[in-house]
Image: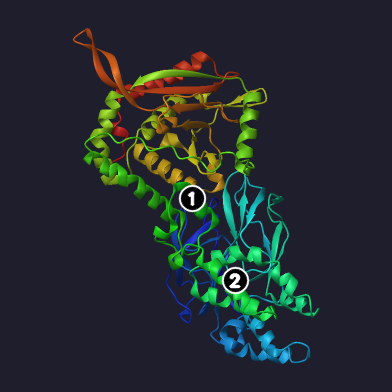
């Protein structure tokens, strides 16, 4: 019997891992506890050892593929090959056609030549169907909504190939196929919400589906003609994959006994109309459309040249950087680009699940709390000079760009420690003062506003804050954030100034009691004292807007907190907190 090598639990908050490198190949002999492969997670990079001694019979997850904890990575046997029942379909592919031919010789009305093609197709799957269940997507996630099916009933799927898109109140993600086979049944329709562990679909060998239409002699053509519309996306998704593309028309030709030459002819234009782009997930395709990136110009860094979100984002950044680099050469200021009319104009769109959650939480917070906002103006001229002076050395030593945000964060955290009422929460008629400062960072994404949390921010220096904020923001935009990384925040920072806003009045989301809005840093004339006399000078200013729950935080509390933050930033004595 074969032994399955599974991805073990690598920490409480680690739910998936990416195979970065296989240290062994199929056919290699391995010893127990010998390293098989390297796995990378958002927490650690580690080797996965072999649980037994034997021979690697099959590798199920390729390099750069991401799978969940508990997924089967490989199978190890005793090296006997055909002796293992698990290996029979894969170790002896040449014997497969003979067995089906003998079994199918009995039914007189079934032609052996027609039966052989479908029989060879489900080699990777078992006769029994496998249920695709909604996996756990985080400790606090109990349900998910099917937003879109990427496959239709009757489609062939490979192991780890995306089946559908799921939306939760924390993340939007794709659910991959646990096995190879044919999608036999879809149990949950689009826009339906189900609990974690619920069966979403069934995947089988495809043999039952091929046998049922052959009973009536005149009816196979009608079901075969109707699925042409859903099959088109499947053809589009497999564009530029020579082997699957060659096999896909073979099965329809065998099943459709009438006009076998017409089906491939219809499928060929569908494949050619996909702009010669390798397979990309719908999420990546949507991101490319939103960023204005032509997928034909993007070189994929994934397995087999697959285009990933990172590739699209890099291409978008490169396109934005090109006009910026050319701007200094222009003798006159360039005219602003014309406003692009959105394709959403004049349409009606259904709210995403995340947007519904944000809307419900915003209304609930406004109804349950008494919110108001206090604003102060901060002179950050000294801070700006410090940042300009050290940012080059900072990036060289840490690899991270030094923005104003980590300075604001460390000043806010210190003020929270001095005035913990701003960091508190309300539970009934009690005020709870946490022993830590978990700072939520508002991140604008294509799906909506998300707030990943920097845990224990009070124990971190500027370099650590800069690294963690950049990492969380990047993984939030790439939809790689773990649900527990969105939980546990006690206070929020929202950098609306990154879009040029001077200040706003942000909404406090329960259970937190305050949120600090950071405006744009702008230069303008200011009054300064020179030799005891007032003078006008060009200064750098920023507005800080603190929204808070007036049930427990008074205006004087807010003013004291903002005063502490203002004094810290204006003094700009952060040299000892840089961490470099």
In the rendered image, the vertical position of residue 84 relative to residue 350, given as above or below: below
Identify the residue at image location x=67%, y=79%. Answer: 259
Along the line of sight, the residue nearer the viewer: 91 or 246: 246
Residue 514 coordinates in the image, percent (x, y): 53, 26
Identify the residue at image location x=51%, y=48%. Answer: 481
Q: Quadrant of the N terminus?
A: bottom right
The quarter of the displayed image where residue 263 is located:
bottom right
The quarter of the displayed image where residue 256 is located:
bottom right
Q: Secondary structure beneath disc 1?
A: helix
Identify the residue at image location x=27%, y=38%. Answer: 391
Identify the residue at image location x=50%, y=67%. Answer: 272
- On the rendered structure, is 23 left or right of 118? left
Residue 129 seen in this snapshot: no
Question: Badge 1: how crowded within 10 Å, few (<14), some, or many (20+)?
Answer: few
Tell which residue pokes out farthest to the top in this image.
Answer: 533
- On the rendered structure, is 279 left or right of 122? left
Q: Quadrant of the C terminus?
A: top left
The quarter of the displayed image where residue 337 is located:
top left
Question: Badge 2: how crowded within 10 Å, few (<14), some, or many (20+)?
Answer: few
**What residue is pinned by disc 1?**
289
Residue 13 coordinates in the image, percent (x, y): 54, 50
Q: Earlier in the sequence, mark 2 or mark 1?
A: 2
**What residue is pinned by disc 2?**
266
Q: Secondary structure beneath disc 2?
A: helix
Tell which residue pokes out farthest to the right in this image.
Answer: 216
């Amino acid at each position: 019997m074969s032994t399955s090598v599974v991805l073990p639990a690598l920490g409480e908050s680690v739910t998936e891992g990416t195979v970065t490198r296989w240290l062994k190949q199929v056919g290699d002999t391995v010893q127990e506890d010998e390293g098989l492969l390297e796995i990378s997670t958002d927490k650690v990079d580690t080797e996965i050892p072999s649980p037994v001694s034997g021979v690697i019979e099959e590798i199920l997850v390729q390099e750069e593929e991401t799978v969940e904890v508990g997924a089967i990575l490989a199978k190890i046997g005793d090296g006997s090959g055909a002796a293992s029942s698990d290996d029979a379909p894969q170790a002896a592919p040449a014997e497969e056609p003979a067995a089906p031919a003998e079994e199918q010789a009995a039914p007189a009305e079934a032609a052996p030549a027609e039966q052989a093609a479908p029989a060879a197709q489900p080699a990777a799957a078992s006769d029994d169907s496998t249920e695709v269940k909604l996996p756990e997507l985080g400790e606090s996630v109990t349900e998910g909504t099917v937003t879109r099916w990427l496959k239709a009933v009757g489609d062939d799927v490979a192991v780890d190939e995306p089946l559908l898109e799921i939306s939760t109140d924390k993340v939007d993600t794709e659910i991959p196929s646990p096995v190879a086979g044919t999608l036999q049944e879809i149990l949950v329709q689009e826009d339906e919400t189900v609990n974690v562990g619920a069966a979403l679909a069934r995947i089988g060998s495809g043999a039952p589906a091929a046998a049922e239409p052959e009973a009536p002699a005149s009816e196979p053509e009608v079901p075969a003609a109707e699925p042409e519309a859903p099959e088109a996306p499947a053809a589009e998704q497999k564009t530029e994959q020579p082997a699957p593309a060659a096999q896909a028309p073979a099965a329809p030709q065998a099943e459709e006994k009438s006009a076998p030459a017409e089906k491939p002819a219809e499928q060929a234009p569908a494949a050619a109309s996909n702009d010669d782009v390798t397979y990309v997930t719908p999420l990546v395709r949507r991101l490319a459309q939103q960023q204005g990136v032509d997928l034909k110009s993007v070189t994929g860094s994934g397995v087999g040249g697959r285009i990933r979100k990172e590739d699209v984002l890099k291409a978008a950044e490169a396109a934005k950087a090109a006009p910026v680099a050319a701007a200094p050469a222009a003798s006159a200021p360039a005219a602003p680009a014309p406003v692009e009319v959105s394709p959403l104009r004049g349409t009606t769109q259904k709210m995403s699940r995340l947007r519904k959650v944000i809307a419900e939480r915003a209304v609930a917070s406004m109804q349950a709390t008494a919110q108001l906002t206090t604003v102060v103006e901060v002179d950050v001229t000294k801070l700006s000079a410090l940042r300009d002076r050290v940012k080059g050395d900072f990036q060289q030593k840490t690899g991270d760009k030094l923005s104003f945000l980590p300075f604001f964060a460390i000043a806010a955290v210190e003020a929270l420690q001095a005035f913990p009422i701003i960091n508190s929460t309300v539970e009934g008629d009690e005020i709870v003062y946490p022993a830590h400062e978990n700072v939520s960072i508002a991140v604008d994404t294509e799906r909506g506003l998300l707030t990943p949390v920097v845990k224990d921010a009070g124990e971190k220096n500027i370099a650590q804050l800069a690294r963690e904020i950049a990492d969380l923001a990047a993984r939030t935009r790439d939809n790689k954030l773990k649900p527990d990384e969105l939980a546990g925040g006690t206070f929020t920072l929202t950098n609306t100034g990154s879009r040029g806003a001077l200040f706003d009045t942000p909404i406090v989301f329960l259970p937190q009691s305050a949120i600090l809005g950071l405006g744009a840093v702008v230069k303008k004339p200011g009054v300064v004292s020179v030799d005891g006399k007032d003078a006008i000078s060009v200064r750098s200013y920023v507005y800080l807007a603190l929204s808070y729950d007036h049930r427990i935080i008074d205006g004087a509390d807010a003013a004291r907190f903002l005063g502490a933050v203002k004094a810290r930033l204006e003094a700009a004595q952060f040299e000892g907190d840089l961490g470099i």
